[in-house]
Image (cartoon, grey):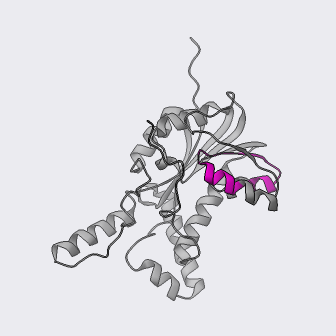
Amino acid sequence: MRVVDLDRDMRDVIPTSTSPDSDYLFQQMTRRTLDRALGLRVLDVASGFGQDARALAKSGVIAVAAEPSARMSALAVLQDGIGPDVHHVRAWADALPFATGTFDAVYCKGALDHFDTPAEAIAEMARVTRDDGRVVLAIANFDSLSCRVARTVDVGSARWGRQLARGRRHYDVPHDHFTRYDLPLMREQAGESLSLELVEGVSLGWGLPRWSQLARRLPAGLTQWLLETLDAIARRWPAGADVVVLAGRPRRAAPV
């Protein structure tokens, strides 16, 4: 039996509107993903509640949302009544029910590490994208600077006999993830099916000890400047970034 998270909940999704750094991370990840998913027909893979597909539909795009969870798809359809129509399809990412070259762009934001067969899913995204189209992936980096520093701090604290707070640490892979991604693995898997044109980081420092508390306490203008400065570093240093966005054209097998 295939083990996959069809009725997954949202326990391990970073809550937005809890701290400026969380809000900034999600806003930038969404904007940079959607800004690169250009075209008239766009597919959102593992679309969840469908909020990104709805945002594209509002701009006149023919947005298709593919999601394996019946519960999430049902909630997404309920929310569609307040905006333009989105075409919802219940489908596995590694078996998309579309003809080759159907879409101008395909994107998968923050979900690839939920898949039990991520390389096959990327290959399917490439297959259903036009030759001159683009596949965009946004993936959490579990080898980010923040993860490395927090892990080192925790190891040091444990050695000194300090008791760590209970619960999952942000550098631990959540219970509903199959893959612990770092930049080399992202490049390897994406490069099998895509000719990569873009690899850039989003946000730097999310999850660092006490950073969220500091971001809430500082003047809003100073916090925004710090977030933008760290983000500019992350763009050029994806290996240390909190999230990595990769985009590329489909690779097509040479005719025999």
Tell me: 132 left or right of 217: right
Place of residue 238 in the rendered image (x, y in percent of width and height, measured from the top left): 46, 55
What's the residue at 53%, 51% (across, down)? 111
Of residue 152 and residue 204, the one placed in the foreground of this image is 152
**Measured along the vertical axis of the image, is residue 214 above or below residue 157?**
below
Place of residue 9 in the rendered image (x, y in percent of width and height, measured from the top left): 53, 59
What's the residue at 54%, 35% (across, down)? 94
Residue 166 sits in quarter? bottom left
The C terminus lies in which quarter of the figure? top right
Of residue 29 and residue 204, the one placed in the foreground of this image is 29
What's the residue at 27%, 75% (across, down)? 164
**Range shown magenta:** 54-76
Tell me: 43 left or right of 163: right
Q: Is 216 included in the stretch rendered in magenta?
A: no
Res. 52 in view: no
Place of residue 41 in the rendered image (x, y in percent of width and height, measured from the top left): 76, 41
What's the residue at 72%, 43% (across, down)? 42
**Measured along the vertical axis of the image, is residue 96 above or below residue 186?**
above
Place of residue 174 in the rendered image (x, y in percent of width and height, measured from the top left): 41, 58
**In this view, which residue lies farthest toward the top?**
256
Residue 80 sits in quarter? bottom right
Res. 16 in view: yes
